[in-house]
Structures are given as structure tokens and as C-alpha cells.
Amino acid sequence: MNKTAIIIPSRLDALRLPNKPLKLINNKEMILHVYEAAKKTNTGEVYVATPDQKIIDIIISNGGKAVLTSLNHQTGTDRIYEVFKTKLKSEPNVIVNLQGDMPNIDPQAITDLVSYMHKDQCDIGTLASSFSSESELIDENNVKVSVKDKLATNIFQKATDFFRAGVKNYKNFYHHVGIYAFTNKALVRYVSLERSKLELKRKLEQLRALENDMSIHVGYISSSPLSVDTENDLIEVKKIMESNE
């Protein structure tokens, strides 16, 4: 039987927005919004992976599952791997790294990604959307992904590059959504690799996979969840989510 785990890495010491996971949206902590979206997928077990006891307490007090992880991880994926190996005994076939700063993620997008990963077509799966404005396109906080062919609903394409600054000479590029699904073999291999030159230069973990010939497939979603990195992002996502209440 195929087993899936959704693991949400989260920590309090983000440089641009300290204590980000505890910021309230509709009187609920951001990390709880993400956790509940993951639970709604009904695709597998959901855990928050964090080095911070405050986050553990919030998740546990709301009936969720959380694992206190090492303080020494360099990346969120390393944190994911600790939970996969120690708590889950390396059993899941598909492991989803869901970022803890996307409180308006659509549960169906996660479900669709998990479904694709169980077809065993790639090492890593992720998602992307179209750019909605020129300002969104030039914002270096927004990661871009280029793909081999145009994206369309329910069609996954091979990623060829990820970048932040400007728009390179790519025909097909999209707004990358920070969610990654690994096969178990791919996750084990990924964390065994040294951090790559491009990964460190652009501060994008996924480039380590591409530089080591691991395949990343990208699926299309019609609306992009807002990744909350700054105070302005928080204000914007509050507007969106409070208007939907």
C-alpha cells in the first residue's frame, strides 16, 4: 500500500519576519492554517517539524501532530528527513514538504500533487502558477521556474531551472509554489548530497536536485497561494483570507 506523509517544516527565527508561524490570521496562527489545509487532503499523516517548543504546543493543543527536531538543520528538507527517518521509520513512499508560510494553500492542489507522485514519474514534484501582474513578476521574493513545455491543468512538465532575479531567456516560465513531494528514494538521495553552488548562490534548495540530475516535474495550479515572507505579505494574505470568511 502506498503511504504518504505531509511534513511541514516551521521555525520562529525567520530573519525577515520573526515569529512568523505564530502570526494570527482570522484569530488563528498561520501554522495552524497550513496544518489544517494539509489535514483536509486526507492523503496521509500530517506532522509539523520544528525546533521550537512554542510551535509544538500550538499544534498539540489543537489536536495535531508535531515533532521537536534538531536546531542544527541547514534546510527545511533536512528537517523533513529527520521526521521521515526517526518518527516515520522511513516507511512513506511519498513525502510532501509543505512550507509553513502558505496559509491559503488549496488542499486540492496538495492532493493533485500527491496523486501524481504515486505514478512514479519523477524524483520530485512541485507546483507553479501564472504571474498575475508585472510587480509579481519582477519581485525577487517570488521564485520563478522554467519548464520544458507550457503548463496546463493536470499536465506536469519537466523543470529546467529555478531563479529569483529578472526573467531569463526562457519561453515557458511560471511563479513557483513552495511545495515539494519526494519519492522516498529521492529524499534519501537528496539529503546525502552536498549543497550545490547554484543552491547557495540563489538560495534555492531545489537547484541541488537539478545540479545532480534528479528530475523535478511541475504541475499547474490556477491560483497561487501567497508565501508570507514579509510584513507586507502578511497584510496581503490577511486581506485575502478575511474576505473569504
Image (cartoon, helix red, strand yellow):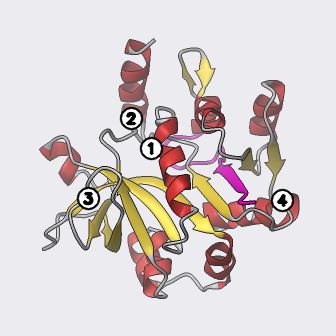
Pick whichever, 104 or 218, lies toward us. Answer: 218
Mark 4 — residue? 88
Mark 2 — residue? 233
Q: Which residue type carries mark 4?
A: Leu
Residue 185 point in image, percent of width and height: 67, 77
Mark 3 — residue? 151
User: Quick one: SS at disc 2?
Assistant: helix
Residue drawn 26% across the image and 68% down it:
146
Residue 39 placement: quadrant: top right
Considering only vertical position in the picture, is 96 above or below 43? Answer: below
Q: CA distance from mark 3 to mark 2?
A: 26 Å
Q: Is residue 174 left or right of residue 46?
A: left
Q: Which residue type carries mark 3?
A: Leu
Residue drawn 80% across the image and 43% down it:
66
Q: Which quadrant would the N terminus be assigned to in this image?
A: bottom right
For the residues carrying marks 4 and 3, which lies nearer the camera in this image? 3
Residue drawn 40% across the image and 28% down it:
237
User: Quick one: SS at disc 3?
Assistant: loop
Q: CA distance from mark 2 to mark 4?
A: 34 Å
Question: What residue range appears in magenta?
Answer: 1-18
Q: Which residue type carries mark 1?
A: Asp
Q: Disc number at residue 229?
A: 1
For the residues carrying marks 3 and 2, which lies nearer the camera in this image? 3
Residue drawn 45% across the image and 78% down it:
215
